[in-house]
Image (cartoon, helix red, strand yellow):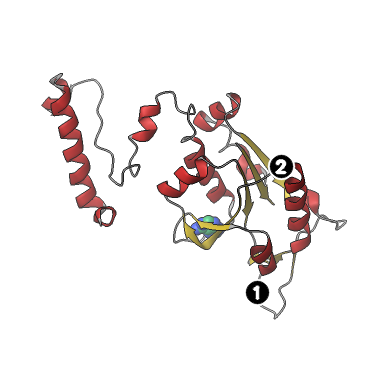
Amino acid sequence: MRIDIITVLPELLQSPLNYSILKRAQDKKLVEIVVHNLRDYSLDKHRKVDDYPFGGEAGMVMQIEPVDRAITQLKSEREYDEVIFTTPDGEQFDQPMANQLSMAGNLIILCGHYKGIDYRIREHFITKEVSIGDYVLTGGELAAAIMCDAIVRLIPGAIGDEQSALSDSFQDNLLAPPVYTRPAEYKGWRVPDVLLSGHQRKIDEWKHEQSLERTRRLRPDLLK
Ligand code: ADE
């Protein structure tokens, strides 16, 4: 799998993509993540990629030419399953979408910026518009980093113990049960006895009950 991210702020993506599981998955060649500076595709001598909006609103708008050049160049080199645009008015990113995208071949993620992007880009190049939540970020870079993190950890082999991705919160529409480690007692606060019992069936039942209870209490919407 290859993920190409197009952005006006490549620096912002350097560190989130190069630690922990994202770094290991790239080292193991499970995924290649390539960040492109949109300004490299500008024909302007000042590497400009935005301009004033028609109709005179406030704020600058990302221009279509550099985006067209960047996407057309990438598409001439390989096939892509989706050309994603990060935007607060997109489809809500969630675990099912992360699962689906983790099984894709190659992805382009275009990070939104400024007041918006020329709408023709969305009409003619973008296949999927994605929001990471109902709040407005300064740009789409952090949204792209979050999506990459959630997607890449689901690629088989990215996590040492594959069970651990399968037992994540949301993977089965339930929140994960609580986990504990040593010491079994700290300042009088004890780990639940069942977890120390060595009785695997009882432990599994307890975990499932805890998942259900936490989901009912904290995220009842997931059970509908
Ligand atoms: N760009 C700005 N806000 C965003 C959001 N909530 N999700 C995705 N991209 C964004």
Residue closest to the far right: 45
Residue 19, compared with residue 118, is above or below; it is: above
Residue that appears at 67% across and 50% down: 7
Task: Tell me which numbered mark, 1 or 2, is placed earlier along the sequence.
Answer: 1
Q: Along the horizontal axis of the image, is 92 left or right of 71?
A: left
**Image quadrant where one finds the C terminus:** bottom left
Which disc number belongs to residue 19?
none
| Residue 168 picture location, percent across and down | 35, 37
Inspect this view and state whether residue 203 appears.
yes
Q: Mark 2: which amino acid?
A: Arg
Which residue is denoted by mark 2 in the rendering?
78
Label 2: few (<14), some (14–19) or many (≥20) C-alpha neighbours in 10 Å: few
Disc 1: which residue = 58
Is 144 above or below relative to 192? Answer: below
Asked whether, in this view, residue 94 is left or right of residue 206, the answer is right
* Residue at left offset 28%, top offset 53%: 222
- Percent of width and height locating residue 190: 14, 27
